[in-house]
Structures are given as structure tokens and as C-alpha cells.
Image: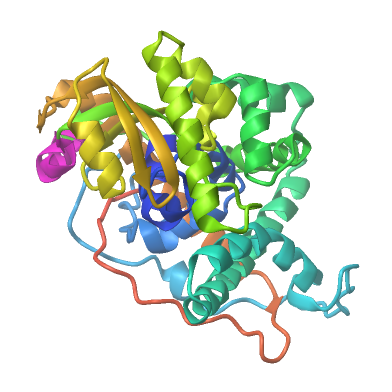
Amino acid sequence: MKVSPKLLVSAKAREIGAGNCYGRRAVAGVLLIVCAMVGTVFYQGCQEGAKMTVKPAPAKEVTAAQPVEKKIVMPAEANKPAAVPSVEKPAPVAEGGEPAVTVNGSVITEAEVDARIKPNLDRIARQMEPNVASQYAKRLRAQAVGGMIIERLLSDEVKKAGITVTDNDVNSKISEITAQQGMSIDALKSMLVMQGQTFEQFEQQMRKGLGYEKLVDRQIGQVDVNDAEAIEYYKENKEDYNTPEQVRASHILIRPDPNIVDANAAKAKALAKAKDLLKQVKAGADFATLAKENSDCPSKVKGGDLGFVERGSMVPEFEDAAFGMQPGQVSGVVETQFGQHIIKVTERKPAGLMPFEKVKPEIVKKLEEMKKGQLFRQYVDKLRAGAKIEYPAGKEPMPMRPPGPAREVEVAPAPK
């Protein structure tokens, strides 16, 4: 099961963008890929983000290569009540405190949930008002518990299926991801440290995710997308390929030193450093090298490169400066709420509709993922329906928000 980094970043940009160094645009692609691989984001995307419903294929068909339709018929399995195993046994309480939920007799503890959400809780505590942060934290916890239930079910199925993940599997996948992101292993390790994670934890998540990927491949297999489906999707979603004007920008960010109590003094120090770096750039110093050595943004691992950005994806001060330059130009020191920036524009793209042939591979991949996502949802729904999931009193899950408009893609039902 392959999940597009571009789609993931796009889907989560507004949610995590407030925490990154240059505005409302997200660059944590590597970590989002891992989240998707371990199942949480991918399943929640099927459940809430993608808003797809499934029309089972006619009985005579055995493949998932079906044309797009507009009829909606939910699978019967999705509405069945959860089956309760006939054998009752006491749930062992794992080390780490009281249970948050019990899945087929296996306890997920409050400590495990807390560990999962702590990095995000720390971030929102810094960025949101206390009452807003409290509400967000409740939702975050509910999503984490739901995701961990799915992970526990999938892990059990991986064991039952006798699926193994070798060190070579893990190393190959990490090499693939770093190549896609254009970074070295050392750069990846630096990014992980900045995100509060060790490389060993990353490897463990990768191993778990690859096990899930193998399981899903066994359960779902391959899906096909024909030219007619791709063309229809392109025609119905031309606005997605009518690209606005974009610039490719790099930057060096100097944040005020949080250890300096006097805010004005901290700001003055950051400004002085930024001005000194700007002098070095104008004197011929390599911009990417200075970014790697001095920038306070995670983009430093890529020489400050932010990729292509469009209007509305950055804070106004940054945006005005970036779109006011031509390729090769470097800005003066630009102040934003995040600190002092030095911006370099390397490319510009005019607005326009991308031709079908250029975006066809992306569309085909997206439709394949949509079909796999629906099949995966069916599979997970069956696992949940057959599981015994128990919540301690007062910790029952929050009701889900009603789904938004669905996009219907006809696929074959998941294997029984």
C-alpha cells in the first residue's frame, strides 16, 4: 500500500502548518509517510478525510478495475453490530497504568496513549489559547485511541499471517523515502531529532508499517485504473490541475533566542545575525551552506529549500517578498511572526491548466490509492466488527462528526 507524500502533506498542511517555521505550509513529509504506513492517518483519511463511500462491484466481477459511478450503496458488513468473541477472559493490565481501551483482551494503557500524543500536545500548548487547546487535546486523544485500536488489530493479523519484515526491507524503504525527499540519512536523522524522535524509533515504526503493508497487499492485492477513469477524473477535477502562480523559494530563518528574557533584546540579536548572514550572501557565500549551518527551520537539511509555494500558503510578509522577486534574487531581511528571514527565489511557474498527459500518472496513482483506501476500510471495518473492544466507564469514544460529501468509486468488495 503506497501513500503519496504529496497527498499527505496537502491533506495535513493546514493542521500542522501553524507549527512550522515559514507559515501555513507543511514540510514534515517524511514523518507523515510513517504515520500513514502504520495505518492511523491512512485509515482516518478513509474514514473522515477522503469521505468516500463504496458501491460493491457486481457479483460476476472479481477485480477492482471498475468505472467511476455516482450511485452509493454502503456494504452490508459496515452496518453490522460488532461480534463478541464467545470466550471470555480477563484482560491483562499492561505496565504503564490504567487501561484506555481493551482490544480482544489486550490492553492499551493511558501511558501508551499519552506517549503517542505528547509531541502534539506540547506543540498546541505553546500555540493555542488554553480553552482551545483543551478541546483540541480531547479530539487528538480520541483519534489516537482509534488509531491505536486499528494498529493493535492489524498487528494481530500480521502475527496470524506469519508475516516477517527483514532488516533489508526496512533499510530499503528508508533509502527509498530519503531518495524521494532528496535528503541523506544524516539529514533524516537531524530532522527526526528536531521532531523529537530518534532514528531507532523511526526504524521501529517503519518495520511495523511494512508489516501492515504486506498484510494489506495480501488482503487487497492490486487494483487497476483504466484511461477512461483517469480522463473522467481529470475532467471533473480540472480545478485541481489549474495551478496558480508559484515560486520556488529557499530561506534562512533566525528565530529570537528563547533563553533571552527581554523580547526586544532577543529580537535585536536575531536581526543582527540575519543582517550579518545577508552580507555574507551578497559577498558571494553559498546560500544553501549558510542555511544548513545557521537556519532555525527544519528546511535547513535541504539547504533551506521550501520547494514550490503559492499565494496563501505562507504568512503575508514572506509571501509578499517571495512573489516580488525573480529567479536568482535574494531579499533583504524579512521579519515575520517566526523570526527574521533571508529569502532566495530560484524558479517561477506561471498560472495555467496542466495538460492531461502530464498529470495522468498522478491521477492514476491517486485513483489506485482511493480504491485501495476503500478496500482497506472495508477490511478494517470487518476486523473491528469481529473484535471485542471495551472502554472503561467514562472513557467511551467521542461521537464521530457526520461525513461530508462523498466521492464514489466503485471497487470490488474486500476479500472475506
Query: Percent from the top left, x then y, of residue 387?
Result: 67, 70
Colour approach in the figure: rainbow
Q: Which residue is at a point 50% across and 38% down the rendered structure image? A: 254
> Quadrant of residue 152 in the image?
bottom right
Residue 2 appears in the rendering: no
- Whether residue 309 sits left or right of residue 202 in the image: it is left
Where residue 94 sits in the image (x, y, percent)? 88, 68
**Placement of 32 over or under 18, stated as above or below:** above
Q: Residue furthest bottom?
A: 393
Residue interval drawn in magenta: 229-244
At horizontal 68% and vertical 47% (from top left) the residue drawn is 196
The residue at the far top in this view is: 284
Residue 104: percent from left, percent from top? 76, 70
The residue nearer to you, when weighing 79 against 400, is 400
Relative side of 204 to 302, left or right: right
Identify the image quadrant of residue 101.
bottom right
What is the magenta segment's predominant secondary structure?
Answer: helix
Give how far across and how far down residue 297 sits, in percent. 51, 37
Q: Nearer the viewer, residue 2 or 83?
A: 2
Q: Residue at x 46, y 11 (%)?
A: 285
**Residue drawn where x is 46% and y is 44% of the image:** 21
- In this view of the protein, which residue sits in the foreground, 67 or 49? 49
Q: Nearer the viewer, residue 177 or 346?
A: 346
* Placement of 256 over or under 389, stated as above or below: above
Query: Is residue 235 one of those drawn in magenta?
Result: yes
* Residue 41 among magenta residues: no
